[in-house]
Image: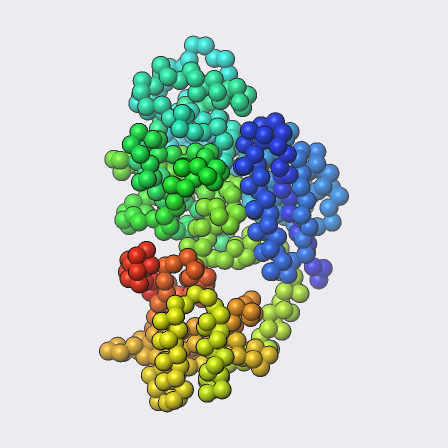
Amino acid sequence: MTNPAILILYNEPSGAGQHARYAESDAGVLGEVDAVERALTELGMTHRVLPVRTLRDVGRALAESSESCVLNLVESLDSSADDACLIPALCTALDKPCPGNGTACQLLALNKWLTKWALRADGVPTPEGTVVPPKQTPLPILTFSGPGIVKPLCADAGEGIDATSVIIEPLAENLREPLDRIHREFGQPALVEQYVFGREFNVSILERKGSPMVLPLAEIDFTAFPSGMPRIVDYRAKWITDSFEFNHTPRCIPARVGKTIAQQLQDTALAAWNCLGCRDYARVDMRLSDTGEVFVIDVNPNPDISPDAGFAAALQAAGIEFVEFIRILLDNAGVPMQQQSKRRQQDAVKRLDMRRSMPRDRNTILELIQDTGVFHSYEIDVAREVLDDALADGENNDYQSYTALFDDTVAGWACFGPTPCTSGTFDLYWLAVNPTCHGHGIGTALLSCVEQAVEERAGRLIVAETSSRPVYKAARRFYANNGYELAASIADFYGPEDDKLMYVKPL
């Protein structure tokens, strides 16, 4: 079988024309390119990265390309606002799979007015709005009263939106200046939309095996905003790293909402996804009004997937590693993984061995725990005591200790035991892998070894405890990827802003 190769297309930051005014968002695509390239390398997929600036560049690149699949990261082109949306259609015409949303979906979502009409036709709630073309006089009669927000009709990434975009009242008398700014800077119509007071949520959706899956809800925290400051995620909040807005709009994920509201947000996001004909992945932005009504304010079929963006945060909260996300996209497009990647996995399995810990493993195990860099000194002291107890009594101790060997060298350690006062419940006390051995499946193999040993002891449930601190994000993803579900959390258990998280897996 011929191994497939991937062409990564992206818009080369130009710093010209409209991009000169919004250079930060224009350059943001570079973070996406780097993340995707690293993921493909980890998957063992042959790939090439190619920058483009115009639709002509794209057509020439695709016609000359020998790659069988295109990962399209192009968010804008110098030629026109619509041109970037045509890339999936060109790929289809040349019989090259192109994961992500298609041309029809992207064109519809780019035009906020057309999006509104489509959503309303499907009964999906969205704020009232009116389109104002350049030089229109007199201004149209608005179909709504109260506060409003003025946006470019066909732009994304927060471009053209700042605090002056929100007009409280009187609305009609204060429209001219923000409208003129949009017309002047973008040369396109402006959308005057009803501003919804309340909370803002980002809902990311990932298609997997033909079904859209709503990832953990994210809420934007505006509590640090002073009174009178519009609570919006504008251009500064998204891109200007030294601004107040950027540093005071943290993302809370998973969002702390009740089950009823969470279900309403999820259902509305899926309705918007279906309405626009989304596929593979997208993000739906919504506002929850002070009266409990949900409104879709944006559907983004080509969201930023760089590591620090909202979609990547949702993947992380769902326990999906970025490399797995890219694998899912390729799988959706019918692109087979390369044989080289499978051989690497098979070789790693052959080099792995699991056995009970022995006294000669002790010092190496303690060193690798230290080398992980995530445990406090007092935690390492506890690990030492537990390990010594397990080594002293072997199978007769409540602490059961297993060592992972990689090329006959100690590379990982796991310790587990029955939970006191329970029937068939076991605690996974420790699981650590030497950082120099990451990427070989050692942690997963250790966990599988523990699960098998627990089953042999008539165990029915394993509980793994970890922390909410950022340094433990890899551990949280690890458990979720291996079938463990977050069953409980205790706020500030270990310390301020250091929650105790309990993951469980029935056997």
Q: In which quadrant of the rendered view does residue 191 lie? A: top left
| Outermost residue to the top | 138
Q: In the picture, which quadrant includes the N terminus?
A: bottom right
The residue lying toward the viewer, choosing from 199 and 425, is 199
Query: In the image, residue 261 lies at what x, y percent?
Result: 29, 45
Query: In the image, residue 67 lies at what x, y percent?
Result: 70, 50
Whether residue 368 sits left or right of residue 468 in the image: it is right
Whether residue 326 sits left or right of residue 446 in the image: it is right
Whether residue 217 sits left or right of residue 38 in the image: it is left
Residue shown at the point (28%, 62%) measured from the top left: 493
**Visible residue check, residue 274:** no
Residue shown at the point (50%, 58%) measured from the top left: 321
Residue 45 drawn above or below residue 347: above
The residue lying toward the viewer, choosing from 47 and 34, is 34
| Outermost residue to the front | 377
Residue shown at the point (36%, 71%) measured from the top left: 378
